[in-house]
Image (cartoon, helix red, strand yellow):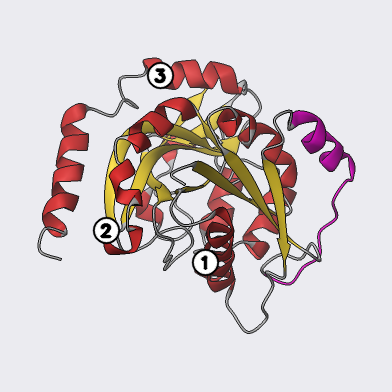
Amino acid sequence: MKKIHVGFLFSHDYEKLKLSIPPVYEASDRIFIAMDENFITWSGNKFEVDPSFFDWLEEFDVDKKIEIYKDNFYIPSLTEIDMDTRERHLLSLKMGIGNWLIQVDSDEYFFDFEKFVRDLRKFDHYLDNPEKKKIQIAAFWIILYKYTDNGILYVDLPMKAVFATNYPDYTCARRTKARVIYTDNIVLHESLSRTEEELRFKLENWGHKREVNPDFLDKWIKVNENNYSQFQNFYYIEPERWKRLNYFPTKDLKQIKEFVITSKVLKLSKTYLFFKNFGQWFKFLFK
């Protein structure tokens, strides 16, 4: 036990796993991919899968550490977000309580997963009797908002996101109600950076389908690399959570990684992390 187990969900954007699996592969002990046995989304829509993806997966998995977990993840009586939460729970049970349970979405790319694992290892004692000392470990997203003619628009502040837990009693997607420990790890999140057709399909089939605000898509369509500073409030649920966008003058993910690493604006200060973690410690002090 006390292994590094990473789980992915397989859905309509499965091709992005070719970008999200490689960064975590070497530092993982095992990788699990949850796949609906009928290739159905949480909204009940069928999606097609190119068999060549599985050829790529087999060729890439040189250490034979990837396991595909098939099950029925479409339950019509549940909402999309409830199915999202349920699938992640079942996936984590498959991964095994007593290990670090890390869930990464197909459009999330760790900058330095080895560092994230080193940070996790500092808290290995939470894997002893995890049900009695539940914990969540967070990193920070750099959220890619939209591809433009010459680059990518992105949300101009890092956003917190939970990736790991020792006990998967999820309440909403991969979040639990346990104390969060924040780490200074960065994950590039290709959240909304799709073609309009791809984005429309995602909005109709993901866990947040019923929460998307009615003005989101119109604004997403209108904004571009020349006018983004004229708009504000971009989040797809509560718009004001993403107040401003900025612009990467490139679409090369490696160049973007270098830009983020050297950016003072996107850097997570030790003071900021200290107060985030102190607040969580104090909140759960008497619980």
Q: Position of residue 272 (x, y in %)?
A: 19, 35
Q: Does residue 273 appear in the picture of this structure?
A: yes
Q: Residue 76 appears at what percent x and percent y?
A: 68, 81
Q: Residue at x 39, y 53 (%)?
A: 166
User: Label 2 belongs to which residue?
Assistant: 133
In the rendered image of this protein, does residue 83 appear above or below residue 242? below
Q: Position of residue 225 (x, y in %)?
A: 55, 30
Query: What residue is drawn where x is 40% and y is 47%?
Result: 161
Q: Quadrant of residue 16?
A: top right
Q: Give the amino acid at mark 1.
A: Thr
Nearest to the eye among marks 2 and 1: give it.
2
Q: Secondary structure at mark 1?
A: helix
Of the residues under marks 3 and 1, which one precedes in the sequence?
1
Using a 10 Å C-alpha cutoff, classify the residue at mark 3 as few (fewer than 14 neighbours), some (14 to 19) or many (20 or more): few
Q: Which residue is mark 1?
A: 85
Judge left or right: residue 155 versus residue 203.
Answer: left
Q: Quadrant of residue 262?
A: top left
Which of pointers 3 and 2 lies earlier in the amino acid sequence? 2
**CA–CA distance between discs 2 and 1?**
21 Å
User: Taking 71 as reference, is 275 above or below it?
Assistant: above
Q: Is residue 45 magenta?
A: yes
Q: Amino acid at mark 2?
A: Lys
Q: Which residues are magenta?
A: 43-60
Q: CA distance from mark 3 to mark 1?
A: 32 Å
The residue positioned 29% from the left and 60% from the top of the image is: 178
Q: Which mark is residue 261?
A: 3
For residue 214, say whether it is visible: no
